[in-house]
Amino acid sequence: MSAASPAIGRTNLHRFLSGYGQEIVVLMSIVALFVVVGAINPRFLSDNNINSIFAGNAYIAIAAIGMSMIIMAGHIDVSVGALIGVIATIAGSLAVAGYPIWVAWTVPILFSMAVNSGVGALVAYTRIPSIVVTLGMLSILKGGLISATAGAWITDMPAEFMIAQMRPFGIPSAVYFMVGLTIVAALFMRYTDFGRAIYAVGGNMEAARAAGINPERTVVGVFALHGFFAGVAGILFATQLQVIQSTVPPNLELTVITASVIGGVSILGGTGTVIGSTLAAILFACIGSALIFLNVSAYWLRAVLGLMILATVLADMARRRRAK
Amino acid sequence: MTAAKLLRHETILAVLTVIALAVLASLSDKFFTTENLLNQGRLMSEVGLVALAMTFVIVTGGIDLSVGSILGLTAILLGVFWKNLGLPLPMAMLAAVACGTFAGWMNGFIITRFRVPPLIATLATLALYRGLAEGISEARSVRGYPEWFFFFGQGEVLGVPFQVWLLGIATVVAAVILGFTPFGRATYAIGANETAARFSGIRVNATKLWIYTAAGFLSALAAVVFVSRVTTTRSDMGTGLELDVITGVVLGGTSIFGGRGTIIGTVLGLILIQALKNGLSLSGVKGDGTIVVIGLVLIGAILAGALFDKNRGG
Amino acid sequence: MRPDGTADAARGRADTFPIALRSVSKSFAGIKVVTSVSFDMRPGEVHALMGENGAGKSTLIKIMAGLHQADEGEIVVNGKVVKFASPRDAHAAGIATVHQELLLFPELTVAENIFLGQTPKTSLGTVDWQTMRRRARELLDSLDSGDLDIDQKVANLSVGNRQRIEIARALAQDARVLIMDEPTAALAEADVQRLMSIVRNLCARGVAIVYVSHRMPEIFALAHRVTVLRDGHHVATKPVSEVDESQLVSMMVGRAIDRLYPAKQGTDGGVLLELRDVSHRSVVRNISFQVKRGEILGLAGLVGSGRTETALTIFGITPATSGEILIDGKAQTITSPEAARDLGIAYVPEDRGSQGLIKAQSIEDNVALANLKRLMRGFLVDAARVTEEAKNAITRFGIRARGPQQLVRQLSGGNQQKVVLGKWLATNPRILIMDEPTRGIDVGAKAEIHLLMRKLAGEGMAILMISSELPEVLGMSDRVLVMNSGRIVGEFDKQHATAEAVGTVMTKTYSDGEAA
């Protein structure tokens, strides 16, 4: 047995590298970006900029956690951007209307979970593909939002409502949410039956059923969870600026889906981690900021992201083919 | 009999469209005027052109999310080729449409050569093409096109808007190809069972490549019409177009799993959507309330279809 | 050494049978596939279940696994009559199956695959990874698989390793009966040896194993008893020590072969198809043979021996990586099915449902699919001629259908196969490759297809037939080639092609060096 221990040590490292390969690549990219861009333009490393990178994009990372779970279960949600817009507006309206702050924070989240449970039930029990159902939801949420608010902005929200702007110990609260929820979600995915069931259903639905998992209930559950994360993201989005624009942030759903995919969640389902998607969301924010500090026009940001997704996907396909 | 079965969804949809038109006409006397109807035709042309190609894409079991970005990129290139590179405008139009077509071919190449799922491949190119449009244009818009150029988006032939003619001709061509040619049969076969299609000597990859290229081409044509209609070029043109297009196609009875769908259905789906948008706004439903109705109609129609299928016992 | 003692001790005490079937029958669509079969298992025995394809073996094991419910008869577990409404009921009764298509989660680790659905928990109710990994390690070690990394993703593992995981999974569920359906069909030789030692190990622990296999050497090395089925009937159950190979074969085949198959018509013409040293990667290795006009060449071999792979190479699905394919003496490069078709090659594939037909489409759509170029008028498909073509196929092959527009998925297996034939014969092929031409088809339709093959050969077609049913190979072929491990290992003419001779070459295990 003693002879085996160095071998086990090696396997542990190997296991870690192979299990978290994509996450490590993303993390390294972030570090490299900070080092290189920081060396060229030290202002990139200023507290102010780092705070804005992390705090300003935390809601995207949090939404990407839920999206990752959805994709791991073998589904997709293209309505999350609209949902976040709706939640932000509901929360802001409640706060302005004078409801207690905790109501303005929690009711939108519950609403979000309820809506997504409904979507999940449609997907699971009627077998309508999730992309069709969420496409419909996108129209309903987007149209509902604009027609309800007529595009009016919400301002004059009470200061104690602005949770994203609070800075306990000098760090923006959005960062606490991002880090905390990522850790909780990662533990949840790894250590609970439900978390493992998500992987199982996304990986091989019939085998999951044979192992005694109820795939339908799992799908409804994962949509409800996704609703929770979208809800929190919506509250942070609502409170990070002094106004809520009452519109749907353009292309937000694609940014969120992209973060999940770059973070290592395979669009074919069954694999990935929520840590990866959070790291990827941070990486996007860093790239966006870095382009500005490198005097590269920020207009090229999306093209860079597009190339990155394409490269990631092609590498993923090549890896899968090699594995076969 | 098969044709009848295929058309069953279309029949339901046609009845639904007629009812919607009747109700809308009774709600507002401005709805059923020639002027209004032609104007609506003008407004649905861009989505319509792309939806024709998207029907083929979805019938093969694929999807193309990048069409809106191709439209935006083509529009930007049109402006850049003309204004910045100084090409004569007709040349610039040709070159821009060629680039848009190439973007579509690129999608097909990634999907067939590297076996990337279409959803993810075109998600990536959605970001890439839009990014190129933004990067190349740096958010500057191009204006000042010559008068003759506005013909494509604002002109009329025999009293009917140019792009309605274009859409009409393209619809007939697409319907004939999908319904009556070997290419159309190959498209259905690929969507219903790709392996069996290949084992029957169908050129699966070539067919898919053509279809994604056509989606790029029609998106590029739509871009020219769009720029001509609104007289200016901006990099955010066509944002979200893919969702409108897919909604129309799916509402038209094309199965998102592939193997089923018709051009007639797509056209009916588009008409229903456009009529709802227009009619509801004419009868006083506020602006985007109509989008809610479209979302509900989409989910409702698919749900009805799914339940209907289940009752037939598959 | 055989633990016959255990079996003896259990004999005659029905209440200790971990599972017994009593007079079980099962029909599908009015066709009886299992007729009043009784079958019992004793603790710690390997009980081989043998029979030709279609003899009812897989239906019988699916009844035991809870996937099918018997129409008549009863299942007895430990002396109690039980009903299995689902696989879960069978699991609860201690019956587990190692599937041919392994039911695993490719992206999860070995340890998790073994325990999914019954993961060990900590006191907090969370997944106890440490215990799970330790127990997975213990289980695999007890299966002599100490080298299998429990943290590896299953996607990266070989078929043999995946199979071991399924076995470990069954043990983790305290299975007392393990059903193994052709467990060695897809295994390399080294893995076969390991599997056999694992099976012995399981027996020693008292697990009863239902072992379905065609491979005689394995049966004689492992099994204590053997049960033979034929045409859904129970033929015999005997201790393996009381039978020999030829007795087993005759019990399985059980009828005079020649009588059932149509006689050859006419004489052979010149060579039409020739393969010279054709290889595809490592699955098809240096294949050379000739097929003449009017000849039916049978390609025998076990599943995974390279027969289908050779056909796919000729048909351009997996183009040859080296060697030459000659048609009418001219070397041809065939890189796609349409190229093969245009050269006059037709391929009726092994898997009708996924490769042969588009089940959601009509008969006429399917028939037209390989013939679109021919059925055009101008740029368009001539719908009238498509219907005409389908009608021709329906009358020519006696397809029982309401009409050309009927959906293929509504037809019976035999009629579906005739639609595939109709599609390909409409291309006017000169070379017809038929892969398992009568699999899953009832006896009547089978005879019709055999007659048709003879007739086509008589008209000058060259036919290459792949079949896992030895009687079919022997009865239909003018000449038999036997494949094993991707190579041709034997050739027999009609007179010398006996079940014993062909069966022996088929099931012999060749080491890599020997076959080369």
Image (cartoon, coloured by chain):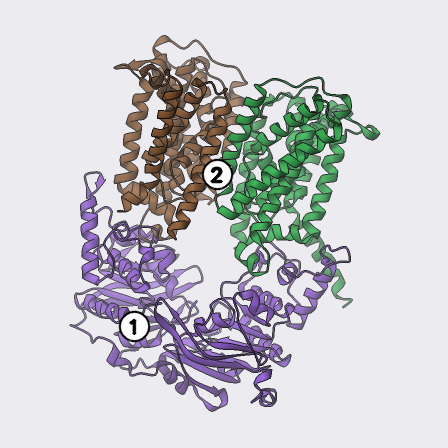
Chain colours: A green, B brown, C purple
Vertical order, A214 against B191 (above or below):
below
Question: What x and y, as percent, mark residue A309?
Answer: 56, 36
Structural distance between the alpha carbons of marks 1 and 2: 46 Å
* Residue positioned 56% across, 41% down in the render: A118
Q: In this figure, which residue is indicated by the disc labeled 2?
A: A132
What kind of element bears circle 2? Answer: helix
Proximity of marks 1 and 2: CB atoms separated by less than 8 Å: no
Q: Position of residue A201 (x, y in %)?
A: 57, 52
Q: Quadrant of residue C26?
A: bottom left
Name the residue at 40% across, 46% down.
Answer: B308
Quadrant, the N terminus of chain C: bottom right
Q: Which mark is residue C340?
A: none
Quarter of the rendering containing residue A141: top right
| Residue indicated by mark 1 | C443
Question: Would residue C320 be visible to someone looking at this image?
Answer: no
Residue B235 place in picture, x, y as percent: 50, 20
Tags 1 and 2 on a common chain:
no
Q: Is residue C107 left or right of residue B263?
A: right
Q: Is residue B302 above or below residue B49?
A: below
Q: Is residue B125 left or right of residue A193?
A: left
Amino acid marked by disc 1: Val
Residue type at numbered disc 2? Val
Q: Residue at x 76, y 58 (%)?
A: C122
Given the current orientation, which residue lies at the most extreme right position?
Answer: A169
Q: In which chain is the residue bearing label 1?
A: C
Give residue C95's position: percent from left, percent from top: 57, 72
The residue positioned 29% from the left and 26% from the top of the image is: B168
Residue A319 horizontal side relative to residue C488, left or right: right
